[in-house]
Each structure stands twice: as C-alpha cells, then as structure tokens.
Image (tube, rainbow, N blue to C red):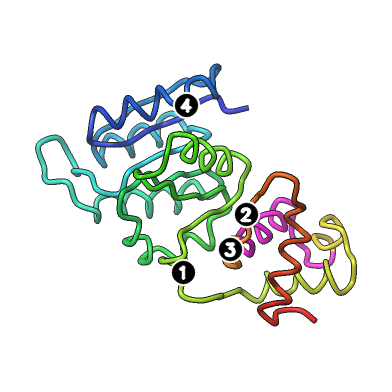
Amino acid sequence: MVKRIVVVDDQETVLQGTINALKPHYQEAEFLAAQTGRSGWEKVDRYKPDLLIMDLSMPEEAGATPQSETGIQLLRNVMDKYKQLNIVVHSIDPMPLVRLRPAIDAHEGGFTVANKAMTIGEMVTRVEWAVQGLNYTPREIRTGVEVRPEWLEVLNLAFNQSLTDKAIADFMNVSERTVRNYWSKMQDALGVYPEPGKNIRVQTGKRAREEGLID
C-alpha cells in the first residue's frame, strides 16, 4: 500500500493538478509537495516515501533559475541512496535522462516517465506501473535494444529451460525481487508494457525472439 508520495514541481498549478489527479487513486496516501531540488531532496530523505513524482527542470532553491541539471542531480542522489524507491519522472522533455541510463538500468524500484503532454489517464497509468515496480522509458532515450548479461540469463532460464522466477533466483543466487526487477528492465528495453487481456511474459518472449535474443 502506498502511504506517502512526494511530488516535486516548481509550477504550482502542475504540482496541485498532479496531486488532485492522484488523490482519488491513493486515498490513504499522504502527499508531500516540493518546488525546488533542495526541498525535494529534504522531503525524500526525511519522510522516506513509497513514491517520488518529479519534474526534471526545477530550481535548486527558491528564486534560482529552473534547469534540467537540478532534476538530474536530484534523481542521481535519490537513486544512489534509495535504490528501491518507486519513481515517476513527469516532464515535458525527458531527453536529459539519457545521462542517467546506467543508473536507471541499475535502479531496483519502479521507474516510469510521464510526459506532461499526456492525458491525466495516461499519467495515472504510468504512476500505477511505477508503484507495481515496472519500468517505462520513452524510446528516444533508449539507443536500440541494449540488454545486460543478467537479463539475457533470465530470458534463457525462463524460455529455454522453463524455470520459474523462484528457480531462476536460486540458480542465479539472487532474490526473487531482483529477478522481477530484471524482467521489468528487460521489458522496457524491448518496449513491452502491460496491455489489457495480454500476458506480458508471452509478449516478452515474442519480442525477444524477434530481436534474436533467444531461439
């Protein structure tokens, strides 16, 4: 259950609009707002939220000029210290995230991107995916299908040896949570996301075969 959500955006109307859009879906959650990189970090570090929703372009402190580097630095600090925090980047321009691709790939929590041009429904879906520990990054910040060796091992063990996630975790000497994280990262790299009525594992296997990652 989501108990605490930190929302960081320097635009008051966007900040309140985001909170109001999410309150019906997370009625028991406490919402904490911040409008600068510094206050955003203070909120995360003090309250240890279940979910962080943040813009990229923001001022470091009140009165400073908003810039994407402030958001990037906040993300870098958050992912370094809180490796399992679920994160949603809510930005009109997600391209600066390319600087953090290795950190995003290594992050153990959910990580999704919601463009501010999206409808409220689409934004809420990205938030729900992050809460579920899933990953979604726009194609433009990915450079082709790049998969890490451990993701390929999961693919092989699952589809070529028919192992369950628990068996895969035992074989690789990692936790089941780590295996689920590998699945999510791999699905994002392949552009496979939840769709009503479709089995995401089956879709993942299909895309992996199309890319030549498994036989």
In this figure, which residue is indicated by the disc labeled 1? Answer: 142
> What residue is rendered at 11% in x and 42% in y?
64
Q: Tell me which amino acid carries mark 1.
A: Arg
User: Mark 2 and mark 1: span between their CA atoms?
Assistant: 15 Å
Going by the picture, which residue comes out furthest to the top?
Answer: 28
Do the residues under discs 2 and 3 have CB atoms within 8 angstroms? yes
Whole-percent x, y for residue 153 in the image: 74, 73
Type of amino acid under label 2: Tyr
Instruction: Say which quadrant the C terminus sits in.
Output: bottom right
Answer yes or no: do the residues labelled 4 and 1 have beta carbons within 8 Å? no
What x and y, as percent, mark residue 87?
48, 44
**Vertical comparison of 120 with 108: above or below:** above
Q: Name the secondary structure under disc 2.
A: loop
- Binning the other alpha carbons within 10 Å of mark 4 as few (below 14), some (14 to 19) or many (20 upward) gives many
Q: CA distance from mark 4 to mark 2?
A: 21 Å
- Magenta segment, which residues? 171-187
> Mark 2 to mark 3: distance in Å?
6 Å
